[in-house]
Every structure is written in structure tokens, then in C-alpha cells.
Amino acid sequence: MLVTVDSRHPKQAKVDLLVLPMTQIDPDKWRLPPRLAAVDKAIGGGLAAILRSGDFRGRSGQRALVYPDGGVPAKRLLLVGLGEPEKLDAEAFRSAAGTAVGEAIRLEAKSVALAVPRTRPVPLEAAAQALAEGGVLAGYRFDSYKKKTNEKKGPTSLSLSVERAADTRPARAAAKAGVAIADSQNVARQLSNEPPNALPPIALAKAASQVAKEVGLKCRVLDVPEMKKRKMGAILAVGQGSVNPPRLVVLEHNPPARGRSGGQKRASAKGRRLPTICLVGKGVTFDSGGISIKPAAAMDEMKHDMSGAATVIGALRACALLNLPLHVVGVIGAAENLPSGTAYRPGDILTSMSKKTIEILNTDAEGRVVLADALHFARTEFDPVAMVDIATLTGAIVIALGSHASGLFGNNERLIDHLKQAGETSGERLWAMPLWEAHRKAVESAVADVKNVAGREASSSTAAAFLATFADDTPWVHLDIAATGWSSKASPYQPRGATGVGVRLLVEALQSWKNSNIV
Ligand code: BES
Ligand code: ZN
Ligand code: ZN
């Protein structure tokens, strides 16, 4: 879908669907905003009639379709509710654009124009970015395995019409960023939706390197001999039960740092200027539980146990497209967790890359084992100022937070606050969970340095405490997306299935990195 920005009056838009977003009105005293009033006048009062009827009041999620009988070149008009004006935020725009594109798909409308309203609390740039994001995200479908539906029915163009000519330029830049971010989130969704037979660790690594090639990232893939050389005993153990061998993938966005004198320098080991931030993703391409096998119900959903990795790939893609002035490194631990004669077992004691030993009590707690090596590799190889890991880690977070927020844990309050804020801005909410000394104590093992499970109590926090051992003294946060990575019901810009959660969040956290006060 091509997203453009212009300052044409909506009443001149010659499109299949003209979308008119509106904030909620007071049924007793309301007035159409000037541009909508002009459209209303041109079509002979049909919009005002709907408002008078009370059928549409601009509530969030509300919509009303109008077929004008001449007066404007648009074939259809769609009123979309933005909700209460005082509560207006970027998310309202994302949802409105999602609703609009959803309707366009239903109506098979190819061209869509949307009148961007002038709204006080949300800056124009934020609105334009959110509208572009919502539109592009809503257009995504996982249909690559269905022959018949392969011809796209969705809209091919979305033009955002701003009120003033002077707004065109800033809105265009913001919409362009929104498209880059949402496209990258769709890349993440696609990878997570891929069936596990199509996406074993090698294929995931290949997908990462293809994305890297497409946008100009550096990509390195460590195979089993290399992982053995580096003594990555944890990730190797998780992968040893499958005929599909594990991989460790490194993606790097390393733009030239602008020197004080204006000269350009590479952010290389010597004279590096840009801070390094590592994003570490859990890439378990299928999680059967291994020898501690899972029950059959919904086991198919464990194809998305590589959603953290998919998000890291998507986020790095966006970093490159937006040319963020940071050295961002993605590290992905990819493995398949299957039971077999060669599988790792409960009772095994592994020596991780960090030399810390891990007692395995349940092979289904494999994500943290994979991340143990990925986190240690990231911090020792790149010496980052901060690390963020993202993982579909625990069933307990599904119970605690549901799909409303991802779990947020960490060892650095500033970093925690920074991510929390990025969550609010991006509409990918986080909720800070405790990570206390008691949780660290709980993962101490009688026979090794740590154990991979510590019972049912506070198991999202003890999982985080396990990871904290390997993050060591590097400022670090952990995002548990077990619930938010997958959506069993559709919403305005989210079709059923993989969500690509974390791409918008991480990109926002990186774009606003300066505010984090972590250098
Ligand atoms: N991949 C799962 C966590 C998960 C659950 C992701 C639901 C998405 C939806 C993880 O590897 C796992 O199995 N965790 C176990 C650990 C337990 C055995 C200690 C869990 O949380 O139940
Ligand atoms: Zn598991
Ligand atoms: Zn898992």
C-alpha cells in the first residue's frame, strides 16, 4: 500500500473510500469541523443527518458508511470515531486508520483518502505517523499458503490529506517513518506466522540475512562448529534434540558517526562515538517442551516461540530504514526444542558460554537457556551500554497481564522507565514486574550455579532472575511477550495470529534514546 500526504480538500478526493475521522460529540451541542462541514454541504447534509440520528457520535471504534448521491467525486464516505477529545492519543489514530483499511478491504476499495483532523493534544507528526502505521498494519494478512486468496483485495493507496499546505512536509516525513516501522512489524508478523516446518533455525537465519541484504545491515550467522568453539553449551543443548541444528544470528546497524568537526567516521572499535545497544531475541522455532513435553492442546501456537527473534529482525530493519544514529546490534538465539534420543534432559547440568553452570529441571523452560548464551555473547562481544531482550518466555505472564501489556523486568531503573515510556508512546504497553533478591535466590541450585525453574510461584519473575544472572552488570531489561506476541482475536489493526509486538516499541525506545540518560 502506497501512503502519500497532500493538502487537497477532502471534498475533491476522487477515491473509492473517503475516510473522515471525528472525535466524540456532545449529542446536544455539536458542530461539524470546517472541512467536514464543507463535505457535508457538498453532499447535501448527509453527514449532519447521521450525527443528528445519534447512530454515530464519534465514539472509539464507531463507524458509519455514507453513499453520496453526487456532490463529491468520492464513491463512499466513512465516518470513523476517534473517541473522547480529551483522551485523544496516537493509538486512537492508529485504530481509526486500522478501522478504515479494514472497511476498505471489506468493500474492496482500492483507493482510500483520509482527512487528517487538526487535533490539539496529538502533534500533527505523531498523528500522521500513527495513521500510516495503523493503515499498513491493518492491511497485513497471513495468506501466503492459500492459493486462491493470493490476489490482494486490500487498498493499493492511502492518501492522508492535511489541512494546511505547510503541514505537508512534516506530515510526509512522519508518515514515511510510520510506513517503514509498520512494514517492519509486518515482516516480524510474517516470520512468526510461518509454520515451524518452513522456518527451522537455519531458515530463520536465512530470513534475517535476506532482510539485512535488503536494507543494508551487517549479518553474521554462527553455525554449530562455531558455537562449539565459543562453548555455547546452553543454546547447543536446547537444539541437540532436533535434526534442525541451532544458529546464533547477529544483525548490525552501524551508521557513520558524525564527528564534531562534521567529518564522517565509522563507529568502529577505535574512536567509536555512537552508543551500542543490543537487542536480544528468543528464537525457538518450535517449542514442543522437549522431554518435558507440553500437552497437545494449542501446541501449534508454539510455532511463534521465535517472536522475540522476529521482533529483533523487524526492529533492526526499521533502524536501517530510518537511519537511526545509534549502533544497534541484534542477537538471535535460534533453536528447535524437540524430544528425541539426543535431546537434553531434566537433570542435565550444562556449562554455558559464561562458564556459569545450569541445572535443567524442566526442558520446557528452554527460552531462558537459549538466552543465557545469547545475552552473554551480546555483552562480551559488543560491550553495549544497554541490552534489551525480548522473548515469549513464560505462561505465567499470560495469566498475570493477558494481552493488555508485555511484562517488563530489569536491573536498571532508568532503562525500565525509558522502555515504559516508549510503550505508552508506541501503543505497545509494558507493565513493570518485580525482580527482587528473593527471585534471584529462588533460582540458586544445590548442584549448579543456577537452575532453570524454581517452581510455580512468581515464575515470570524467577525466569527474569535467571536471565539477570547472565546479563550480569550490563544495564538490561527483559520483555516477556508470551501473551502479546499472539492474538487469538482480530482488532482494528491486528488480524488474528502473530502481532509483531515490540517492533514499534523498540524503535520508539531507540528513536528517543537521548532521553534515557544512558550513554
Ligand atoms: N514458550 C513457552 C512460554 C509460552 C507460553 C509462550 C504460552 C507463549 C504462550 C516457554 O518456553 C515455556 O514453556 N515456559 C514454561 C516454563 C515452565 C516449564 C517452568 C511455562 O511458563 O509454563
Ligand atoms: Zn518451553
Ligand atoms: Zn518456549
Image (tube, rainbow, N blue to C red):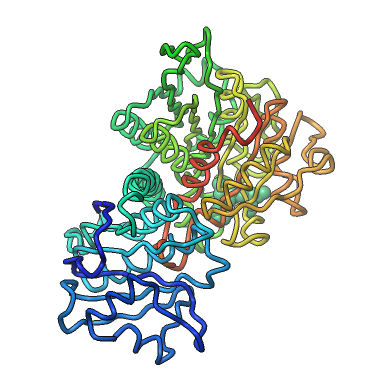
| Residue drawn at the location 39% of the way across and 50% of the way down | 189
Q: 382 or 455, which is in the foreground?
A: 382
Q: Is residue 494 left or right of residue 296?
A: left
Which quadrant is the C terminus positioned in?
Answer: top right
* Residue at figure coordinates x 38%, y 43% from the top left: 177
Task: Give how far across and how far down residue 2 sits, in percent.
Answer: 24, 51
Could you tell me which residue is drawn at 21 percent across and 82 percent down? Answer: 68
Please determine whether, in this image, residue 504 is positioned above or below residue 77. Answer: above
Give whichever of 399, 43 is nearer the camera: 43
Residue 418: quadrant of the picture:
top right
x and y, in percent, of residue 164 in the image: 33, 56
Q: x, y percentage for residue 271?
A: 53, 9
Image side of residue 216 versus residue 251, left or right: left
Q: Nearer the viewer, residue 357 or 131?
A: 131
Place residue 16 in its image quadrant.
bottom left
Whether residue 391 sits left or right of residue 458 in the image: it is left
Q: Residue furthest top?
A: 270
